[in-house]
Image (spheres, coloured by chain):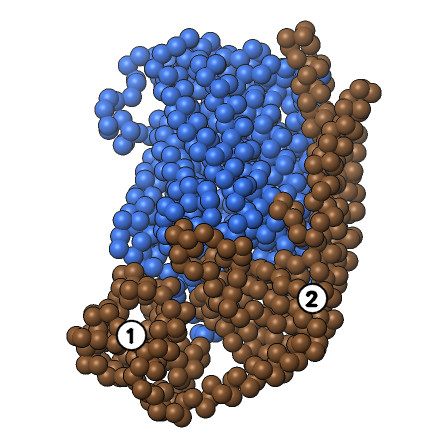
């Protein structure tokens, strides 16, 4: 073993190949991580542009820019792209970059599989987005694609959509297998499970969630496929099926899915808060238990998305109680973050600003989530803009801010160059203000009675909608600034040291590596004491 | 610590001040309506209670967080403490969180049990969601009608100013008596819709093939406006719900009038109609039922909604033309209108399309009589 280690110690002659083949054939965890992140960034702009179409149409009452049919396509694809094309790939990208570095491994356990799981994604999204250019138009049934709107009444292109979801699911499952294998088998000697960095913990749990639920999603779309083309009636009451069955299957996938989109952010935020508070994370073990309980509970709350579907009283109450229970571990996490800041020595670099905003705004999303859990009140909230406000609060200043915080936190390590702090702060403040301007008014219009997925609305909702549109455009264009900052941090600037941030050498193995780290991460396995 | 407490108190008063205008008003632009039924008021109170608990938790948690952020700035020389755990504290806040949740669950359960009640009503109404309109059938009196948006396309397209009830007005509102228990049996004809009246706090999905129930007991006359809240396709935003709650006497008079009107409609089928009569009636039917897809100019929105102007079927194939109206198109967007329109209406709308646009000159010019539709119905047992 030692001789092998010796030959690989010299990084000079073992760099990546040049040109496009470096990216096509790469099995390197950092290259694949980079691919995932750039893919996600590209999708952010595509999905974001669709959101701009939606918001522009909703700027004032009446139909101005697009017709309802196209509006529905934009709405649907915005949701699908943001969920499957932005948030999930970005987290997988961060996992690829950081997990080997954080656990002291040279690479991912299954590098070729890693290449495959990335390259499936551009295929899936090419299939999906191509439908928008077909005569029948793209998917128009909402990202939750409830049957029979997505089966009997769907545009013909729904079959492309189904295959696209299958490919995305395969990509996620392969990626998860890789992550679990890496974490369980390749940790540095001495790194017991309860010594793992929280980002690694959050991803271990996320990966299990993915393996558990992606096949369920595949099952749901396969049943759709059968209903559409092969004469079955899973979701058609006329043939003995049940449209509500679709919703049960979908949300059995869908609810764990929403935790898939937030748990890795919990990990990232924990690291950032302890770094910039200069104080170890408060309650590490309760953080791990909280992550685990959230994951387990996520399997028994799915029908809280379906309170108006006509469930028996006992069902309504069960799902209300189980949903409320999730507030306990989530609350514990928030308390732990605050307790980490308490009596720290705090500085406010861009990643910390995003992390603080994350804690505050994600918690607001948590509050509205708790309100939505209350079944009788949910009769009034369900499918209104209140729900839109809720899940955008947990997904944009939640997941997306978590990702951005992670990028700012780790990019000096990746590129060896410090990002531009002034521009970073500008990016933060513009994003912070505009995200609230966009999504806070949605609480009000939702409570006042504006249903979601409406291309046009009654006059009483006009003011708040105009505000939201202004906010959305500021938020959208602000992300071009992030693109500029990232490119700048790749090309030139102040060199970053190996520890990057003050006092990080004790926080994790990634900070013991050079900035940028060598192409093969840990040629010699480090030891954790 | 004292000044922090004072500051949070002040903040609370500010929040209270901001929201107080909304708390006691019936219809608000930024809060849930209190509504006009016991249940809707209970739900409103529950909503406010939970919201205030959340606001208070937020004030405390964010208060401590922002205070820490200010107090322990490195720039003021703060030195980090070393502690990283406190078992008792962890247990304490876990228990505290659980207790708060139990406190929320108890009133919620109570309200839920009241709201959930599927016993028969004094008036029972079958509500069916169609793409994109509501159908109401009074089970005791055997009255039924469709309720459709009346906001004009010109208003939607910003060609003329929008009226006060833009997108929340219909031709025939649902009429219910006050101080009676009204039960709704809710189902869907095609895709899933959802029937929502905020002032009653009633929202139930209309699932094709299944019947859900909801009920209300309104004690105040008035017009209550709601919406479809489950994405149901292109015109999801254009199928509002309007309910008119009236005194018992007015309700009875309305029922009698509806029954008489239905009887008169039935007699029209036996009459032999002239081309002009059919076209005149057909135009109205077309504008109400067909333009959403086939457009005013008959050219549709191909490929999903085909053009009727110049269509081979509309111009030259009367039999198939009738079949499509009566049976819909399998696998296509066209629904069957056999149970949605009367024989007279179907005959006149077919005649109208066969005589309009270029079809009048290019086609065979055949008209359809109401009797032919009745015959078709009898032959196919529709």
Q: Position of residue A236 (x, y in %)?
A: 45, 69
Front one among A365 and B241: B241
Residue B372 position (above or below residue A17): below
Labels 1 and 2 touching (C-beta < 8 A): no
Farthest right residue? Answer: B2
Q: Secondary structure at mark 1?
A: helix
Q: Residue at x 36, y 48 (%)?
A: A66
Residue A184 position (above or below residue A386): above
Which subunit holds the residue at mark 2?
B
Front one among B121 and A408: B121
Q: Gap in Å between the C-alphas at discs 1 and 2?
A: 42 Å
Residue A340 position (above or below residue B339): above
Q: Colour of chain A?
A: blue
Q: Residue at x 48, y 67 (%)?
A: B148
Front one among B332 and A504: B332
Q: Position of residue A418 (x, y in %)?
A: 44, 13
Give the labeled residue for mark 1: B353
Q: Colour of chain B?
A: brown
Q: How many marks?
A: 2
Give the labeled residue for mark 2: B221
């Amino acid at each position: 073993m030692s001789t092998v280690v010796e030959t690989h110690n010299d990084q000079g002659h073992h760099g990546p190949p040049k040109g496009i083949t470096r990216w096509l054939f790469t099995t390197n965890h950092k290259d694949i991580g980079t691919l995932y992140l750039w893919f996600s960034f590209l999708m952010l702009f595509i999905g974001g542009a669709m959101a701009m179409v939606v918001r522009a149409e909703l700027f004032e009452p009446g139909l101005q820019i697009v017709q309802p049919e196209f509006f529905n396509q934009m709405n649907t694809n915005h949701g699908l792209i943001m969920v499957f094309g932005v948030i999930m790939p970005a987290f997988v990208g961060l996992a690829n970059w950081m997990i080997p570095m954080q656990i002291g491994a040279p690479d991912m356990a299954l590098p070729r599989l890693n290449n495959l799981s990335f390259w499936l994604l551009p295929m899936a999204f090419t299939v999906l987005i191509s439908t928008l250019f077909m005569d029948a138009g793209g998917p128009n049934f909402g990202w939750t694609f409830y049957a029979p709107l997505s089966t009997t009444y769907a545009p013909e292109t729904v079959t492309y959509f189904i295959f696209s979801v299958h490919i995305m699911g395969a990509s996620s499952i392969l990626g998860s297998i890789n992550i679990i294998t890496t974490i369980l088998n390749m940790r540095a000697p001495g790194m017991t499970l309860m010594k793992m960095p929280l980002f690694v913990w959050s991803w271990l749990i996320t990966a299990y969630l993915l393996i558990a639920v992606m096949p369920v999603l595949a099952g749901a779309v396969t049943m759709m496929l059968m209903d559409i083309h092969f004469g079955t009636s899973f979701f058609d009451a006329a043939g003995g099926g049940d449209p509500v069955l679709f919703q049960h299957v979908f949300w059995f996938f869908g609810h764990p899915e929403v935790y898939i989109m937030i748990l890795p952010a919990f990990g990232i935020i924990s690291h950032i808060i302890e770094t910039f508070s200069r104080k170890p994370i408060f309650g590490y073990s309760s953080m791990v238990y909280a992550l685990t309980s959230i994951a387990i509970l996520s399997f028994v709350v799915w029908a809280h998305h379906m309170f108006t579907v006509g469930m028996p009283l006992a069902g309504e109450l069960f799902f209300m109680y189980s949903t409320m229970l999730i507030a306990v571990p989530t609350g514990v996490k928030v308390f732990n973050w605050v307790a980490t800041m308490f009596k720290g020595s705090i500085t406010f670099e861009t990643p910390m600003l995003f992390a603080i905003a994350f804690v505050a705004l994600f918690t607001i999303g948590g509050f509205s989530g708790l309100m939505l859990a209350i079944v009788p009140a949910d009769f009034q909230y369900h499918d209104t803009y209140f729900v839109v406000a809720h899940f955008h609060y947990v997904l944009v200043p939640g997941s997306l801010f978590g990702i951005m915080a992670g990028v700012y936190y780790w990019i000096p390590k990746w590129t060896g160059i410090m990002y531009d702090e002034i521009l970073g702060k500008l990016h933060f403040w513009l994003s912070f203000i505009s995200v609230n301007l966009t999504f806070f008014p949605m609480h009000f219009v939702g409570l006042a009675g504006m249903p979601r997925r409406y291309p046009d609305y009654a006059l009483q909702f006009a003011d708040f909608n105009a505000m939201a549109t202004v906010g959305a455009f500021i938020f959208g264009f602000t992300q071009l600034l992030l693109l500029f900052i990232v490119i700048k941090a790749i090309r030139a600037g102040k060199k970053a040291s190996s520890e990057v941030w003050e006092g990080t050498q004790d926080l994790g193995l990634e900070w013991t590596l050079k900035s940028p780290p060598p192409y093969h991460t840990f040629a010699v396995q480090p030891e954790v004491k | 610590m004292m000044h922090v407490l004072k500051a949070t108190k002040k903040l609370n008063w500010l929040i209270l001040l901001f929201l107080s205008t909304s708390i006691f008003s019936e219809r608000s632009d930024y809060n849930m309506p209190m509504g006009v039924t016991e249940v809707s008021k209970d739900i409103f109170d529950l909503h406010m209670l939970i919201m205030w608990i959340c606001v208070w938790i937020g004030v405390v948690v964010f208060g401590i967080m922002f205070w820490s952020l200010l107090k322990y700035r490195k720039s003021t020389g703060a030195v980090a403490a070393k502690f990283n755990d406190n078992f008792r504290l962890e247990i304490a806040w876990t228990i505290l969180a659980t207790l708060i949740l139990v406190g929320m669950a108890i009133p919620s359960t109570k309200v839920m049990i009241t709201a959930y009640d599927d016993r028969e009503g004094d008036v029972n109404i079958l509500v069916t969601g169609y793409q994109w309109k509501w159908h109401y059938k009074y089970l005791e009196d055997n009255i039924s009608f469709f309720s459709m948006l009346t906001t004009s396309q010109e208003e939607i397209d910003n060609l003329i100013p929008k009226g006060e009830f833009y997108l929340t007005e219909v031709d025939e509102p649902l009429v219910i008596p006050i101080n009676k228990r009204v039960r709704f049996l809710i189902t869907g004809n095609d895709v899933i819709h959802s029937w929502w009246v905020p002032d009653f706090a009633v929202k139930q999905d209309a699932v094709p093939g299944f019947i859900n129930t909801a009920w209300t007991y309104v004690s105040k006359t008035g017009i209550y406006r709601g919406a479809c809240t489950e994405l149901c396709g292109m015109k999801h935003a254009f199928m509002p719900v309007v309910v008119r709650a009236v005194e018992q006497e007015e309700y009875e008079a309305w029922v009698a009038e509806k029954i008489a009107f239905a009887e008169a409609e039935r007699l029209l089928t036996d009459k032999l109609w002239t081309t002009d009569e059919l076209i005149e009636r057909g135009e109205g039917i077309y504008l109400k039922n067909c333009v959403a897809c086939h457009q005013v100019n008959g050219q549709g929105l191909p490929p999903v909604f085909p053009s009727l102007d110049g269509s081979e079927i509309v111009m030259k194939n009367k039999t198939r033309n009738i079949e499509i109206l009566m049976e819909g198109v399998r696998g296509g967007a066209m629904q069957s209108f056999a149970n949605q329109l009367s024989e007279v209406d179907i005959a006149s709308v077919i005649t109208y399309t066969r005589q309009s646009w270029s079809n009048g000159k290019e086609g065979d010019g055949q008209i359809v009589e109401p009797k032919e539709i009745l015959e078709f119905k009898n032959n196919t047992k529709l």
